[in-house]
């Protein structure tokens, strides 16, 4: 807007200067006509119409840029200034007596001119009717053009310097005025990176409400998550004992037949449902201020635990986390996903399980790289039609295998619902790969 305003102002000033300079040219030409009228002697056709020496010496110098001539009523020249030696200027059109006519012309030598003509009636003694004469004075346009060009150079030089100075001042003012916002952004990035837990800087009055509300949002979010987890833990503990008592009483009663089996199945279903809902509800999910977690020690810890659990089967469990494998979320969510996927792979593997974690390339506009968790086993695989169905809660391909069939469904809820990611299963005979992609933006 500053450049636009100064540009428009510059063009306006330039236009006003051109009009003023043109008016000055016309005033000078009028003065020349009045000077010629004051010196003219047109009474005697045998005498010189004007004296040899004129107040304007440039009219006596050839090619001086100042010219004058007088025409009779029939268009014949009566007098020409010496400056018009070798130069011709077209006679002006007939104009009313007492009127000035201003026009642009080109001389016989292709020189641009400004010309002013004036028609006058000259009363001569001894003649019944006054004679009509037309005076024409001209000025070369080059002086006007040079004056305008000189003014334009000075105008745009000063305007350019003024624009640069004002833009510099505005930039400094904006940088000074917006510095608190940049500092807030730096502190928010520090909170996201886990280097601090709240916005602690001193800010102007206009930003204090923002920083205070951000701190309150972060504090409330952490408080509610922790209280939610405590409530879930209390609920799990309060339900665990009654279910165990009911199961023990059923076993002591030794109910047989359809009724006993029905009660045992219902108690088991309640236990599975409570466990699933508690695991699902405890999912924290992504949030803007989650500090980054290094996935490497988590992967190694889970792999080490599984080696101990499945030591009797002599499984080869390998793990690898690429550098910069950062997880922006709750550590329990990552352990839940990797643990369930790896444990499920160990149950079906014949001899080897591989756990890989790596960051994905950032997409345009993405601030946090997505994290991919891939678990591969050399088990028997599954039909392609069952690859999607296996993620449903409670579905088990082999009823003889341990577990309640809720592990993969919990993984799906954590990844897809909690982090907006995706679960993919690729299975062939002798090979199954389960890939979970976490999104953090």
Image (cartoon, rainbow, N blue to C red):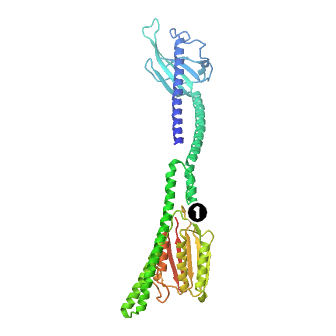
| Residue 298 x, y percent position in the rendering | 59, 74
Residue on which disc 1 sits? 193
Q: Nearer the viewer, residue 62 or 430?
A: 430
Q: Residues within 10 Å of mark 1 (few under 14, many from 20)?
A: some
Confirm whether residue 377 shows in the render: yes
| Residue 187 x, y percent position in the rendering | 57, 57
| Most distant residue in the top direction | 126
Can you tell which quarter of the image residue 48 is in? top right
| Picture layout, residue 41 above or below residue 199 | above
| Picture layout, residue 382 above or below residue 52 | below
Q: Nearer the viewer, residue 180 or 112?
A: 180
Can you tell which quarter of the image residue 160 is in? top right
| Most distant residue in the left direction | 259
Q: Nearer the viewer, residue 193 or 389?
A: 193
Secondary structure under tag 1 reads: helix
| Residue 189 x, y percent position in the rendering | 57, 59
| Residue 21 x, y percent position in the rendering | 54, 27
Confirm whether residue 389 shows in the render: no
**Which residue is painted at 53% across and 30% down in the image?**
17
Q: Report the number of discs.
A: 1
| Picture layout, residue 252 above or below residue 298 | below
Tell whether 247 sits left or right of 428: left
| Picture layout, residue 316 above or below residue 420 | below
């Amino acid at each position: 807007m500053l450049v636009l305003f100064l540009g428009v102002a510059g063009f306006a000033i330039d236009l006003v200067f051109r009009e003023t300079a043109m008016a000055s040219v016309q005033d000078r030409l009028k003065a020349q006509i009045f000077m010629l009228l004051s010196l003219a002697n047109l009474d005697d056709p045998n005498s010189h119409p004007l004296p040899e020496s004129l107040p304007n010496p440039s009219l006596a110098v050839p090619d001086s840029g100042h010219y004058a001539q007088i025409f009779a009523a029939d268009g014949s020249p009566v007098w020409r200034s010496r400056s018009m030696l070798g130069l011709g200027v077209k006679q002006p059109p007939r104009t009313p007596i007492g009127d000035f006519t201003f026009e642009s012309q080109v001389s016989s030598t292709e020189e641009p001119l400004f010309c002013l003509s004036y028609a006058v009636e000259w009363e001569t003694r001894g003649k019944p009717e006054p004679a009509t004469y037309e005076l024409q004075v001209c000025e070369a346009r080059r002086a006007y053009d040079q004056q305008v060009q000189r003014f334009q150079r000075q105008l745009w030089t000063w305007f350019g310097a003024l624009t640069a100075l004002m833009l510099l001042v505005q930039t400094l003012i904006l940088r000074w005025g917006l510095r608190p916002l940049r500092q807030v952004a730096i502190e928010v990035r520090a909170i996201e990176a886990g280097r601090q837990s709240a916005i602690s800087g001193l800010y102007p009055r206009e930003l204090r409400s923002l920083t205070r509300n951000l701190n309150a949002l972060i504090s409330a979010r952490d408080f509610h998550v922790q209280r939610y987890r405590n409530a879930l833990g209390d609920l799990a503990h309060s339900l665990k004992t009654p279910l165990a008592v009911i199961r023990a009483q059923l076993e002591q009663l030794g109910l047989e037949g359809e009724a006993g089996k029905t009660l045992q199945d219902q108690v088991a279903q309640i236990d599975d449902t409570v466990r699933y809902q508690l695991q699902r509800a405890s999912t924290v999910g992504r949030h803007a201020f989650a500090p980054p977690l290094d996935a490497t020690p988590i992967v190694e810890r889970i792999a080490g635990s599984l080696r101990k659990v499945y030591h009797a089967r002599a499984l080869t469990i390998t793990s690898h986390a690429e550098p910069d494998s950062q997880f922006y979320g709750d550590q329990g969510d990552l352990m839940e996903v990797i643990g369930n996927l790896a444990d499920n792979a160990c149950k079906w593997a014949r001899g080897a399980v591989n756990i890989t974690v790596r960051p994905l390339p950032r997409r345009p506009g993405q601030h946090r790289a997505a994290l991919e968790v891939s678990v591969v086993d050399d088990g028997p695989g599954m039909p392609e039609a069952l690859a999607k169905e296996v993620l449903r809660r409670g579905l088990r391909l082999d009823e003889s295998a341990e577990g309640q069939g809720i592990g993969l469904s919990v993984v799906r809820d954590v990844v897809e619902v909690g982090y907006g990611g995706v679960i993919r299963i690729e299975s062939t005979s002798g090979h199954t790969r389960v890939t979970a992609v976490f999104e953090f933006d």
